[in-house]
């Protein structure tokens, strides 16, 4: 990934927050059939390993878990809010007209080694954790015990777990840090007015870039 220093974010907390707030990652693998991408909701455990561990599950019918080998290098891409930025939103454009369109976004690339976990206990724990996390905001959270036991066991047997030991995290937060403060804030305020509040908020308070 092309990464100018002013867009590079190395603070682990900022990278972890993005991954946890946007857990649907694009898992990139390269097997005998070439490159493949699978979009999976991940659990991130920052307490394990040097850089954390990612866990997910795939359908047993998905060939991914049979095509990868334990220890294969993989990449998972997490993306936060993104959007088009018009030059007209920069106050400086009205002064010198030296502005062009761009696209702002924030992403984290997690590089690591994959391991297949065809283990019902692992899958149950993972599903329970994902369920608690994503049902937490519901007035009556769904829990695994709500489903009939035989039905749930059928569902558990229909998926296979995967685990990725993260070896490095690369963060790129392209949020107008290379612009004058007035121009960055002008673009953020326009996004805010247009309802793109997540991207606007990120641009108003970008994390510190790489020194």
Image (tube, rainbow, N blue to C red):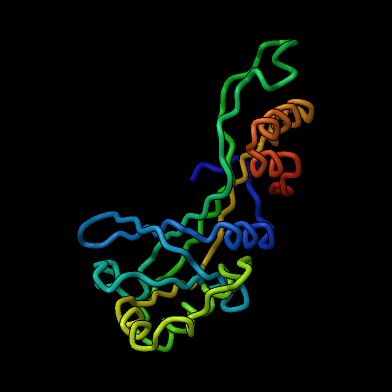
In which quadrant of the rendered view does residue 15 lie? Answer: bottom right
Q: 142 above or below 38?
A: below
In the drawing, does residue 107 fall left or right of residue 200? left
Q: 137 above or below 180?
A: below
Q: Is residue 146 visible?
A: yes
Q: Nearer the viewer, residue 189 or 139?
A: 139
Picture coordinates of residue 184 (x, y %)?
Answer: 72, 31
Q: How many marks?
A: 0
Q: Name the residue at 30% across, 73% down.
A: 69
Q: Name the residue at 70% across, 36% down.
A: 177
Picture coordinates of residue 174 (x, y %)?
Answer: 61, 40
In the drawing, does residue 28 fall left or right of residue 178? left
In the drawing, does residue 180 fall left or right of residue 50? right
Picture coordinates of residue 207 (x, y %)?
Answer: 72, 49
Picture coordinates of residue 8 (x, y %)?
Answer: 63, 47
Return the residue found at the far left.
33
Q: Is residue 211 visible?
A: no
Q: 211 above or below 96?
A: below
Q: Name the residue at 76% across, 31% down.
A: 185
Q: Nearer the viewer, residue 5 or 86?
A: 86
Q: 165 above or below 83?
A: below
Q: Nearer the viewer, residue 207 or 127?
A: 127
Return the residue found at the far right.
182
Q: Name the residue at 59% across, 63% down.
A: 20
């Amino acid at each position: 990934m092309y990464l100018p220093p002013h867009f590079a974010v190395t603070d682990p907390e900022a990278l972890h927050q993005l991954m946890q707030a946007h857990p649907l990652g694009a898992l990139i693998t390269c097997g005998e059939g070439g490159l493949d991408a699978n979009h999976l909701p991940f659990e991130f455990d920052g307490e394990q390993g040097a850089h954390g561990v990612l866990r997910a599950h795939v359908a047993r019918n998905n060939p991914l878990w049979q095509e990868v080998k334990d220890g294969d290098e993989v990449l998972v891409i997490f993306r936060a809010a993104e959007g088009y930025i018009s030059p007209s939103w920069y106050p400086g454009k009205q002064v010198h007209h030296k502005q062009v369109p761009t696209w702002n976004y924030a992403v984290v690339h997690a590089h690591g080694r994959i391991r297949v976990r065809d283990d019902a206990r692992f899958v149950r724990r993972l599903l329970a954790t994902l369920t608690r996390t994503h049902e937490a905001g519901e007035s009556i959270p769904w829990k695994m015990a709500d489903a009939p036991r035989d039905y749930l066991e059928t569902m558990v047997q229909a998926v296979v777990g995967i685990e990725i030991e993260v070896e490095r995290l690369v963060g790129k937060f392209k949020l107008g840090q290379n612009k004058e403060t007035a121009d960055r804030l002008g673009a953020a305020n326009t996004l805010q007015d247009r309802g793109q509040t997540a991207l606007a908020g990120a641009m108003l308070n970008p994390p510190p870039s790489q020194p």
